[in-house]
Image: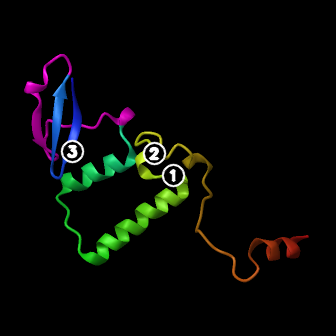
């Protein structure tokens, strides 16, 4: 099996187990010969690879929206996406609240609790 040992823009260097470094190979990130080893892949790496494979080009506004969503994911995980597993990132979905997300105006939850008490 091979393993990505370096990334340089749109290409990666692959080292093959049991072979010398002179047999290392450079492949484009969109190569069909690459696949994610999900158990070892971070969510950040998986998202970057999928975006590169999609050949997506975003205008400035779309790029800001994407960055906002990525930052929101980091906020939700309380961790950098480079530290979040691509296979385990959504394991808590069974405990999510269903329905619309809302925020309580002026006074927040304490005001609600005062009314209920």
Q: Quadrant of the C terminus?
A: bottom right
Residue drawn where x is 73% and y is 83% of the image: 106
Find the magenta span and give its range: 17-40
Q: Quadrant of the N terminus?
A: top left
Q: Is residue 109 left or right of residue 52?
A: right
Residue 14 against residue 51 in the figure, above or below: above
Q: Look at the numbered discs 1 and 2 and tell me whether their residues touch, using CB distance below 8 Å.
A: yes
Please tell me which residue lies in front, 33 or 4: 4
- Report, in whole angstroms, how far the alpha carbon at label 3 lies from the one at label 2: 19 Å
Residue 43 against residue 76 in the figure, above or below: above
Name the residue carrying label 1. 79
Q: Look at the numbered discs 3 and 1 and tell me whether their residues touch, using CB distance below 8 Å.
A: no
Label placed on residue 45:
none
Residue 5 against residue 56 in the figure, above or below: above
- In the picture as drawn, the residue positioned furthest to the front comes out as 21
Please tell me which residue lies in front, 100 or 74: 74
Q: Earlier in the sequence, mark 3 or mark 2?
A: 3
- Give the structural element (helix, strand or loop) at label 2: loop
- Give the structural element (helix, strand or loop) at label 1: loop
Q: Is residue 66 left or right of residue 106?
A: left
- Report, in whole angstroms, how far the alpha carbon at label 3 lies from the one at label 1: 23 Å
- Report, in whole angstroms, how far the alpha carbon at label 1 lies from the one at label 2: 7 Å
């Amino acid at each position: 099996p091979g393993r990505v040992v370096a990334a340089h823009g749109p290409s990666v260097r692959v080292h093959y187990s049991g072979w010398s470094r002179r047999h290392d190979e450079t492949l484009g990130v969109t190569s069909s010969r690459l696949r994610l080893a999900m158990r070892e892949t971070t969510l950040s790496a998986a998202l970057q690879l999928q975006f590169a494979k999609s050949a997506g080009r975003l205008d400035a506004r779309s790029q800001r929206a994407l960055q906002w969503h990525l930052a929101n994911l980091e906020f939700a995980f309380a961790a950098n996406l480079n530290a979040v597993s691509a296979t385990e990132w959504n394991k808590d979905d069974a405990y999510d609240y269903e329905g619309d997300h809302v925020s309580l105006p002026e006074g927040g939850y304490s005001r609600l609790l005062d009314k209920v008490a």
